[in-house]
Image (cartoon, coloured by chain):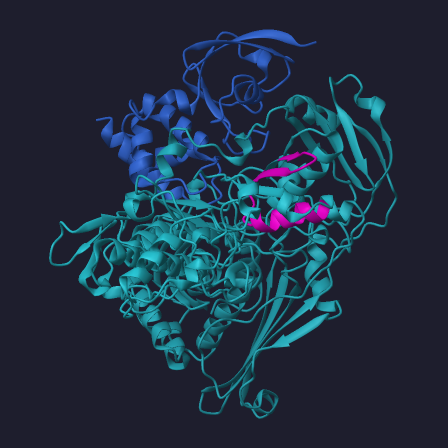
Chain colours: A cyan, B blue
């Protein structure tokens, strides 16, 4: 079996389909004849269809004993595929090195949701673990028949089933099934995507038996990247391929009314592809395509500039009509508690639109042929890209093969999905394979944005100084203007420009924590998108979708309450946080950082350079993180150096501590960047953040000196996600540290030098420090 | 308007027909088939396209073909191989630096030039040499560890 199966093999139903259901449980008293029949039925026949309820959809044992694990998610560079390999090797009892994880190819894996929501291990790994455990069970059953021993007399070491009493009585996995198929059915929960789960009869191992899971194994994709032997999706070259570039309107919402093809007639082979508002060029050579896109003379329709400016965005959100409101289950009577409060503390926070600004602008290669379509994509959602191309081109999904290949970075619903659809439309139009790589201005300017938001928080204090009520509300652009499973025409620029309106869904969130107050209410409200069609300010998932903004506000506010009550910020948290694992991460971060109990701000510093410390904590789908930030501030320049972070992290069972640490470190550094620098700028016509000068991110000279990570392992608890949770509390930890150092509360991200300076100056000019 | 250029890349001669204004990056990637320099911005702002021109790191996305002349071009693939790795490549593997890995040309090629002139740079000197390069995954701390490790390996 190869990595890329021919599609025809998947549509052919196995003659023995269903035979696997005869496979019996270990320990059931059955005769040898039955077992032999099961054995021959189970390991023969063609490959069954690639469907979620077939074991062969996840695991293959090759003739040489190597194992392939077919994974419908993929690794964005955080070591996920190492973890999946560990989980599969563990359950199968084969050496880790013998397992190859093949990710995100629609011809070899079912739709497990792609890279999504930090669920790679939490959901994807859970399924692969269950499948591998079932494969081991079936293989042992086969050995029962072959060796004439009962299942409980057998064990497995390094892919060899042997008698416990006599290791010489043995059968290797390769002998038992190598190169053939399990044809074993699984109990599928009928979900596709992240929630797909299809276990077999086998129960995965108890954690006490784990030998491979939990080890700090290295990633196998490092050396190929360092020695340039691995291709990125930008490096794919299909035979006969042309290069394409897209042309976006200068004013969002306008469409081309006149395209002067003569303006590029001197560029060899350059052609225009125009379908309603969809405007691209193709050429034989990449440089010619770039030149053609720049030189093409286009007259655009006159439209009213659709946007407020960057400076007006928060007022826009405040004034905008609420499209949907959603509330977490309220506790007590919040309104009454505020009416009778001795004191009310309140604050409002603001978070800007942010760009994925991937290291390279997105790229895809699509080859549209009469009988099939092939797409090479860096999208996190190759299965949804397959479905989206099918919809966009009007072909059956079975005729589309999407192959995920490492792209230039990915942190959510980036520009990758749009690039795939653009390449598909161009390829269909010119009848040749087309490679599209966006230009920088397309990548930063036109990617879906992390939504801008405002957050209002209130706390009611009673006469004895206790917090009795808490009220938190976010009002924001939706995180679902375009869906994270973003292939449908209404979710892509190609769809929008070809006349399909944006179909904005409603999604935001509330703080994820376990603070207990007598009266508590948390809610969110979404507002309509700024434009109902192709928009450079459409919003979507950007790493830890809406987590950074919500917890910047909620965890800054908890600190404001602590300061108002003259309490140590850790102490106030520990008074109200109820979940024991939450308490443990807060205590671990505080202890490791050498936290001294005292209220903020500190009042013992004079002069230009001051330092402070701040804590913040959050949960995320079962994972919990507490962060202590230590920052230095230059009051004159407004420059912040987020010097040190102490992170306590609990995601249940740790599969690979080494990769987990690296993932956390990346989250922290990206979180610092988002907090200190990142804000999408726009005027009323379009986005004006179009490159690294107009969308600055963290520079290496501003990198933290130390990120101390405390990993709290709970091997007895199923693993939860780690790809995103630790970016969640970063902004609040920094904000709280700035307050500790200066006594000034900054409630709007980013904390650029200008904003810090003006905040400090405003505080100096008004109320004196403290 | 296209002209013939002879490029010396990783010790081999290549003849390329190209527009003199075309950036070197496209000749390396599309005409010579070297995938390692990447297109990141086309504006010399990120470093993903960095190669050495006579040992000096340059941004190939803004270096016109006409400006290359007979200079020796070295790409990351030419810096070292799995059999004969550059110390920075060894250090990168040992420190497991890259996440997506799209940015590494800039960091490794720039750091390699630094270590040629300064065997034992201080932390501040390393940061100063690497300032302006971009990494979006946030691997900066691992990059610094790797450069220091490579510096130690170089003795």
Frontmost residue, A391 versus A633: A391
Q: Is residue A218 visible?
A: no
In the image, A487: left or right of A126? right
Q: Magenta part of the protein: which range?
A: A366-392
Residue A85 visible here = yes
Q: Quadrant of residue A429?
A: top right
Residue drawn 64% across and 43% down?
A399
Where is the N terminus of chain A found, in terms of image quarters?
A: top left
Up-down relation of residue A714 to residue B124 (above or below): below
How far across and how far down the image is residue A623, in percent? 41, 66
* Figure check: A38 above or below A699: below
Count of numbered badges drawn on the protein: 0
Q: Residue furthest front?
A: A33
Report the front residue among A159 and B17: A159
Q: Position of residue A707 (x, y in %)?
A: 34, 53
Going by the image, does A332 lie left or right of A25?
A: right
Name the residue furthest left. Answer: A165
Q: Picture coordinates of residue A416 (x, y %)? A: 60, 44
Tell me if residue A42 is in the magenta stretch. no
Question: What residue is drawn where x is 43% and y is 32%?
Answer: A230
**Residue A388 among magenta residues:** yes
Q: Which x, y percent locates residue B36?
A: 47, 27
């Amino acid at each position: 079996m190869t990595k890329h199966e021919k599609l025809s093999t998947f549509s052919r139903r196995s003659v023995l389909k269903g035979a696997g259901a005869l496979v019996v449980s270990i320990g059931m008293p059955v005769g040898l004849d039955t077992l032999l029949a099961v054995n021959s039925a189970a390991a023969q026949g063609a490959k069954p269809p690639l469907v979620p309820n077939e074991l062969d959809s996840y695991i293959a044992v090759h003739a040489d004993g190597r194992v392939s694990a077919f994974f419908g998610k993929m690794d964005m560079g955080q070591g996920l595929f190492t973890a999946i390999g560990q989980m599969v090797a563990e359950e199968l009892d084969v050496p880790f090195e013998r397992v190859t994880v093949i990710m995100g190819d629609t011809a070899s894996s079912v739709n497990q949701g792609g890279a999504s929501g930090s669920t790679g291990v939490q959901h994807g790994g859970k399924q692969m673990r269950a499948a591998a455990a079932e494969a081991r069970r079936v293989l042992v059953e086969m050995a029962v028949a072959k060796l004439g021993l009962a299942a409980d007399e057998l064990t497995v070491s390094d892919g060899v089933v042997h008698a416990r009493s006599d290791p010489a009585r043995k059968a290797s996995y390769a002998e038992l099934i190598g190169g053939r198929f399990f044809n074993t059915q699984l109990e599928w929960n009928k979900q596709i995507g992240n929630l797909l789960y299809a276990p077999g009869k086998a129960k995965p191992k108890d954690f006490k038996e784990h030998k491979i899971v939990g080890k700090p194994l290295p990633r196998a994709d490092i050396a190929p990247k360092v020695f340039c032997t691995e291709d990125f999706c930008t490096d794919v070259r299909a035979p006969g391929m042309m290069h394409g570039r897209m042309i976006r309107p200068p004013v969002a919402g306008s469409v081309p009314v006149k395209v002067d093809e003569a303006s590029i007639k001197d560029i060899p082979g350059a052609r225009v592809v125009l379908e309603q508002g969809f405007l691209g060029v193709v050429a034989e050579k990449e440089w010619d395509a770039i030149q053609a896109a720049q030189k093409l003379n286009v007259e655009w329709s006159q439209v009213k500039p659709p946007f407020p400016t960057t400076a007006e965005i928060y007022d826009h959100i405040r004034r905008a009509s609420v499209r949907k409101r959603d509330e977490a289950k309220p506790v007590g009577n919040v309104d009454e508690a505020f009416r009778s409060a001795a004191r009310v503390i309140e604050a409002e926070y603001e978070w800007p639109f942010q760009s994925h600004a991937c290291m390279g602008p997105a790229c895809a290669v699509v080859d549209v042929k009469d009988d099939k379509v092939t797409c090479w994509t860096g999208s996190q959602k190759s299965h949804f890209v397959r479905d989206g191309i099918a919809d966009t081109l009007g072909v059956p999904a079975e005729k589309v093969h999407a192959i995920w290949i490492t792209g230039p970075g990915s942190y959510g619903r980036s520009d990758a999905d749009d690039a795939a659809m653009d390449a598909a439309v161009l390829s269909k139009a010119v009848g040749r394979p087309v490679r599209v790589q966006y230009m920088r201005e397309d990548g930063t300017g036109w990617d879906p944005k992390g939504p801008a938001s405002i957050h209002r928080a209130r706390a009611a204090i009673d006469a004895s100084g206790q917090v009795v009520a808490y009220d938190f509300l976010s009002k924001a652009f939706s995180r679902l203007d375009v869906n994270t499973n973003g292939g449908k025409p209404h979710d892509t620029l190609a769809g929008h420009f070809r006349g399909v309106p944006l179909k904005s869904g409603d999604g935001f969130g509330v703080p994820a924590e376990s603070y207990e107050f007598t009266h508590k209410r948390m809610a969110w409200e979404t507002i309509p998108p700024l434009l109902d069609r192709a928009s450079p300010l459409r919003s979507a998932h950007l790493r830890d979708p809406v987590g950074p903004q919500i917890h910047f506000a909620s965890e800054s506010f908890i600190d404001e309450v602590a300061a108002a009550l003259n309490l140590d910020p850790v102490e106030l948290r520990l008074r109200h946080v109820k979940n024991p694992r939450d308490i443990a991460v807060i205590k671990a971060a505080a202890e490791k950082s050498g936290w001294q109990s005292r209220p903020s701000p500190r009042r013992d510093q004079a002069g230009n350079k001051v330092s402070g410390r701040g804590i913040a904590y959050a949960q995320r789908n079962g994972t919990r993180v507490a962060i202590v930030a230590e920052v230095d501030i230059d009051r004159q320049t407004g420059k912040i150096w987020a010097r040190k972070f102490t992170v306590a992290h609990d995601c249940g069972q740790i599969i690979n501590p080494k990769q987990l640490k690296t993932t956390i470190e990346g989250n922290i550094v990206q979180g610092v960047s988002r907090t200190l620098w990142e804000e999408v700028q726009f005027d009323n016509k379009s986005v004006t953040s179009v490159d690294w000068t107009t969308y600055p991110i963290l520079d290496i000279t501003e990198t933290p000196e130390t990120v101390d990570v405390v990993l709290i392992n709970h091997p007895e608890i199923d693993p939860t996600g780690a790809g995103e949770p630790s970016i969640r509390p970063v902004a609040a930890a920094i904000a709280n540290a700035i307050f500790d150092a200066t006594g000034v509360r900054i409630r709007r991200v980013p904390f650029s030098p200008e904003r810090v300076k003006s905040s400090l100056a405003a505080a100096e000019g008004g109320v004196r420090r403290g | 308007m296209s002209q013939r250029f002879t490029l010396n890349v990783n010790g081999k001669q290549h003849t390329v027909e190209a527009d003199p204004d075309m950036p070197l990056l496209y000749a390396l990637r599309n005409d010579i088939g070297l995938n390692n320099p990447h297109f990141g911005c086309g504006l010399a702002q990120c470093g993903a396209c960095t190669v050495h021109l006579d040992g000096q790191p340059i941004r190939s996305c803004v270096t016109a073909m006409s400006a290359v002349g007979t200079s020796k071009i070295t790409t990351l693939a030419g810096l070292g191989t799995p059999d004969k790795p550059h110390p920075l490549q060894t250090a990168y593997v040992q420190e497991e630096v890259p996440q997506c890995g799209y940015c590494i040309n800039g960091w490794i090629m720039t750091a390699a030039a630094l270590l040629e002139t300064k065997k034992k740079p201080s932390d501040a000197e390393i940061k100063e040499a690497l300032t302006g390069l971009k990494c979006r995954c946030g691997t900066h701390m691992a990059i610094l560890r790797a450069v220091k490790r490579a510096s130690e390996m170089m003795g």
